[in-house]
Structure formats: structure tokens, C-alpha cells
């Protein structure tokens, strides 16, 4: 196991522990929309008026974990195709190109099925799909080949379509942040910018 994989495994465990610790609180963080809340997006609680709004310098990508190739299609939508009952791991890559006077310190992201937000389900991921890490909030500092000098975070996510899974469309909600949020007052203390990407889940039948 490489050092990168060890760090990724530790991050996954840490994220799972974080979900456990906040399960009893309505003020969940990372984004409550992915745990207990029914907010439509991160902007329900946080402003998106930080200095990192320019799309050209913002890095948001979903890569195949084996090939490291982007899964973005010509329409700008990321497509994750998986054979029913099998697993596929992708990498969520978020960051900024070098040159910011003050780059974001943390990157938060969430894969969410909009149709699940208003439900009481703990997971807001697409129904019928197993997933191990649909959200995270990670301090920048990861290194990825081809992105030298960029301020990045990267973590693996493994998905598996069960017998009940169907093709689905997700939102990848991303926030670049700096500062510390004031508990119960999401618009104070945190400088942030919000971004949205589309992700298609496609079941490949055997």
C-alpha cells in the first residue's frame, strides 16, 4: 500500500468517524443536506461571495481511480458507469490553480440526489447505490501528478449498483472555504464560494 493510499484510507475512516460524532446533532457539518438537514444546497446556510468565483482557475474533476482519466463528457457532465453488483472507485479532485493571494484552506463536497433531499433517509445518495464516501470536508494540501503547484484535495469514493439501482443524476455540490464557521450562524466567520456540477450514474447490465 502506497503512502497516498494509506492517507486516503485514514481520511475515509476519519470521515466515517465524523459522521458518527455529528449524528446526534441537527447542526451537522460537513453539509447538513447530506446528513440530517433538508436544505437544497450549501448556500441555504453559507454565502458564496468569496474571492475564488472564477471558474477558469477552479479545479473540479472526477477521475477513474485506476486510469486517472477524467470522467467528464463533452457536455460537461461526469459519467460513472458501473456493472450491476460490481464496484468502481473514482477520485474527487477539487482545488485551485496557483496564484491566489489567499487560497481556500478547506474544500467541502457532497454528491446528492436532489430527489432525496426532502426524505428522511440518512443518505442523500441515489437509492439502490452503495457508496462509502459521498461527502467530505478536507484541508488542502494533497499532491496529484499533472497539477503541480495547485492547492488540491483528493479522496476516493467507491460505488456499487445493487439489484435495486437505476440510472440516476446527481449534483456534486462543492464549497471552497477559508476561515472558521460560527456555530449556528453559517454566514459568519467563513469565506466561501459554491460550485455545482452534474454527475450521471449509469448501470451496465451483464
Image (spheres, helix red, strand yellow):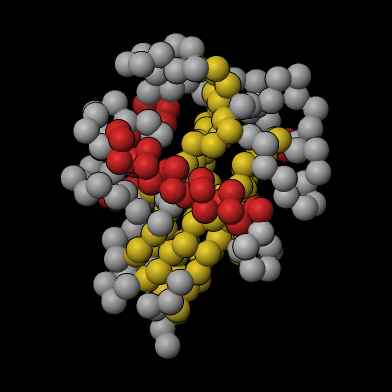
Vertical order, 72 against 178 (above or below) = below
Pick the quarter of the image with the N terminus: bottom right
Q: Is residue 41 left or right of residue 72?
A: left
Quarter of the image for residue 40 reads top left
Q: Is residue 147 left or right of residue 2?
A: right
Pick the quarter of the image with the C terminus: bottom left
| Residue positioned most to the left | 120
Looking at the image, which residue is at 70% across and 20% down?
102
Quarter of the image for residue 166 reads bottom left
Vertical order, 166 against 47 (above or below) = below
**Residue 152: % across, % down:** 67, 40
**Residue 137: % across, % down:** 49, 36
Vertical order, 113 against 159 (above or below) = above
Say whether residue 111 is visible: no
Looking at the image, which residue is at 43% across and 76% down?
86
Looking at the image, which residue is at 48% across and 12% down?
189
| Residue positioned most to the bottom | 206
**Residue 156: % across, % down:** 54, 55
Looking at the image, which residue is at 72% across and 45% down?
143
Q: How many marks?
A: 0
Q: Is residue 103 left or right of residue 169?
A: right
**Residue 92: % across, % down:** 57, 51
Say whether residue 102 is visible: yes
Q: Is residue 130 left or right of residue 99?
A: left
Vertical order, 53 against 74 (above or below) = above
Amino acid at each position: 500500500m502506497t503512502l497516498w493510499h494509506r492517507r486516503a484510507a485514514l481520511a475515509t475512516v476519519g470521515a466515517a468517524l465524523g459522521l458518527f460524532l455529528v449524528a446526534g446533532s441537527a447542526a451537522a457539518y460537513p453539509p447538513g443536506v447530506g446528513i440530517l438537514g433538508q436544505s437544497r444546497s450549501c448556500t441555504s446556510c453559507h454565502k458564496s461571495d468569496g474571492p475564488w468565483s472564477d471558474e477558469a482557475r477552479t479545479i473540479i474533476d472526477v477521475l477513474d481511480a485506476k486510469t486517472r482519466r477524467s470522467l467528464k463528457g463533452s457536455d460537461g457532465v461526469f459519467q460513472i458507469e458501473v456493472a450491476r453488483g460490481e464496484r468502481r472507485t473514482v477520485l474527487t479532485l477539487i482545488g485551485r490553480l496557483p496564484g491566489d493571494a489567499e487560497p481556500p484552506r478547506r474544500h467541502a463536497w457532497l454528491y446528492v440526489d436532489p430527489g432525496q433531499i426532502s426524505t428522511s433517509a440518512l443518505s442523500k445518495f441515489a437509492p439502490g447505490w452503495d457508496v462509502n464516501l459521498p461527502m467530505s470536508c478536507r484541508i488542502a494540501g494533497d499532491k496529484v501528478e499533472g497539477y503541480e503547484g495547485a492547492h488540491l484535495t483528493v479522496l476516493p469514493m467507491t460505488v456499487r449498483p445493487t439489484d435495486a439501482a437505476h440510472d440516476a443524476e446527481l449534483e456534486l455540490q462543492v464549497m471552497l472555504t477559508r476561515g472558521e464557521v460560527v456555530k449556528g450562524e453559517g454566514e459568519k466567520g467563513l469565506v466561501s464560494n459554491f460550485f455545482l456540477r452534474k454527475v450521471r450514474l449509469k448501470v451496465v447490465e451483464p
